[in-house]
Image (cartoon, grey):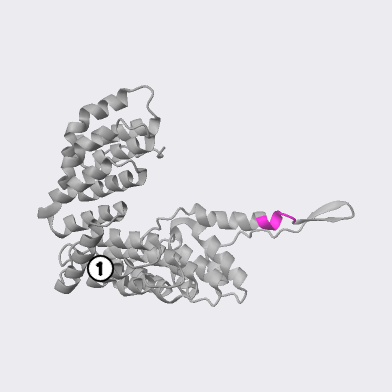
Amino acid sequence: MRIGIWNISLLVFTIIGLSSWAQEGGEKKEGGEKKDIAPKIPIKSLKSWIIDLKDKDPSVRDFALSAIPNYGSSTSEAIPAVIDRCLDPDAGVRVKAVMALSVLEILDKDIPRTVDALAKRAQEDPQAQVRYLAINALQRFDPVDARRTIAALVDASKYPNAYEVRRIALIALVKFGIDKTTGPDVKAVTAALIALKDPAIPVRYAAITAIALLGKPNNALVSAGVDKALTELANGSDKIFAIWAKVGLANQDVLTAATHVQFLSRMLKQGDLQVKLEAMRAISVIGALAKPTVPDLIDLLEDKDNWVVFNACLTLGSLNVEAREARDPLTKLVAKKDVYEPVKQAAANALESIKGVTPKPMPKAP
């Protein structure tokens, strides 16, 4: 059984917004008295809303899709009818159907049909918004359930009318394309290689991070293409792309990781904030092999930018026991009285991680 990862208040907001819109100007004066003409939200049973999903009026179907998720965890009986609305001729209704499938309870028996319906919207829907939301909804599922969507996601990664669809498709391909037993899905890796030439920077960024995270493909031709692309980017002028190319090269051959980790250490000393942050994120991905960066991360605990210090704490915590030499600096940071509270909590959490203790939930970033 699957429960949606989206905050259900998103759909509650839809209903509240509709009601508020109706109430604005929803009062009419007759004989000097105000008369409320705003439509009332009816209190109905779940079965009644399910029946409304077949109403000939698209606004009724739309409203039903906004209402159903608010019935909590007992909405699985609505899934077949909601899936049918994914083929609705009205684009607005399809949007609501896909959004509903991202939050509704889905029984195991309904997972294959739900995954297939979302994959079809991701691959074929004429509206970019529907495609985007469908791909986002797919990511609630485990790879074992959604690996069958890779072909649809590859097609979506080439969708010409919206770069955000291409970007999120590449992100989903990472989740569903990784296979530690047989190597990453070759189609997913190939799609990411093609996307490196995308005109949109966010898509190219998603592509390089996908290649870095997917790992070495078990296909000589594709693997050679990956090595060539990563080597070119690692030696290029764009430091952020070079960072992730280095992660990819380390993931291709762990014996070369030390060289690439040295590059990340140098990037931590750059004046550019984004370069520092990307280097820290990359270090977290590499994990224990990035232990040589710990002294440079400790230096960042003295940075004047709270955002840098906050992320340095997170990165040290992600290295767990490999960052044990950071215990004293982190302890001193926690003890300081004038430290911004989220930074202090991040430092405390890092200490817990280094000790092997599950840290407390993180506060909001500064």
Label 1 secondary element:
helix
From the image, which quarter does the C terminus lie in?
A: top left
Given residues 118 and 270, the one toward you in this image is 270
* Percent position of residue 131, x then y: 44, 69
Identify the magenta region.
Answer: 21-25
Residue 307 image offset from top left, x and y in percent: 37, 38
Q: Quadrant of the N terminus?
A: bottom left
Q: In this image, 201 relative to 60: left or right?
A: left
Relative to 34, 94 lies left or right: left
Q: Residue furthest right?
A: 31
Res. 238 image quadrant: bottom left
**Viewed as shown, does residue 148 lie left or right of 47?**
left
Residue 332 position (above or below residue 208): above
Number of numbered callouts drawn: 1
The residue positioned 29% from the left and 38% from the top of the image is 312
What is the crowding at mark 1: few (fewer than 14 residues within 10 Å), some, or many (at least 20)? many
Q: Secondary structure of the magenta portion, mostly?
A: helix
